[in-house]
Image: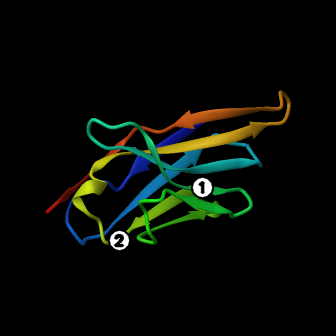
Amino acid sequence: VQLQASGGGLVQAGGSLRLSCGVSGSLFTIYTIGWARQPPGKQHELVAHITNTGNTKYGDFVKERFTISRDNAKNTVYLQMNNLQPEDTAVYYCNLQGFESTSSTWKGYWGQGTQVTVSS
């Protein structure tokens, strides 16, 4: 399983970015896929995820600024981020948690990070 993240960059406060995470090699039918981030000097935190059933969860700091969505035909998950603020500056990572039915265990995969920098 490979995850390819893209879409990061430099944006001014109040601006928007859309992150993409392309997934290849995954046959999981039960999964959660989404984004975590690591701000400078801080630990990883959940940004948003979406399950195979379409349920979504967002970090408390999102406050309706971000929207996660998926395009199953393209095997891609998107994170639309609006009204970005300097505190959103972080490396954003795509993460897939898939349930492997043969072993009844969850398998985790991470993509490479993409840097998001928000200037004030």
Q: Earlier in the sequence, mark 2 or mark 1?
A: 1
Find residue 21 and report its horizontal and vertical position in percent. 48, 52
Q: Amino acid at mark 2?
A: Asn
Residue at (46% x, 61% y) in the render? 79
Q: Is residue 32 left or right of residue 69?
A: right
SS at circle 1: loop
SS at circle 2: loop
Q: Is residue 120 visible?
A: yes
Q: Which mark is residue 82?
A: 2
Find residue 94 and report its horizontal and vertical position in percent. 48, 45
Viewer-proximal residue among 17 and 22: 17
Residue at (54% x, 43% y) in the render? 95
Viewer-proximal residue among 103 and 7: 103
Q: Is residue 27 left or right of residue 74?
A: right
Find residue 98 and report its horizontal and vertical position in percent. 69, 41
Q: Is residue 9 visible?
A: no
- In which quadrant will I find the C terminus? bottom left
Q: Which residue is mark 1?
A: 75
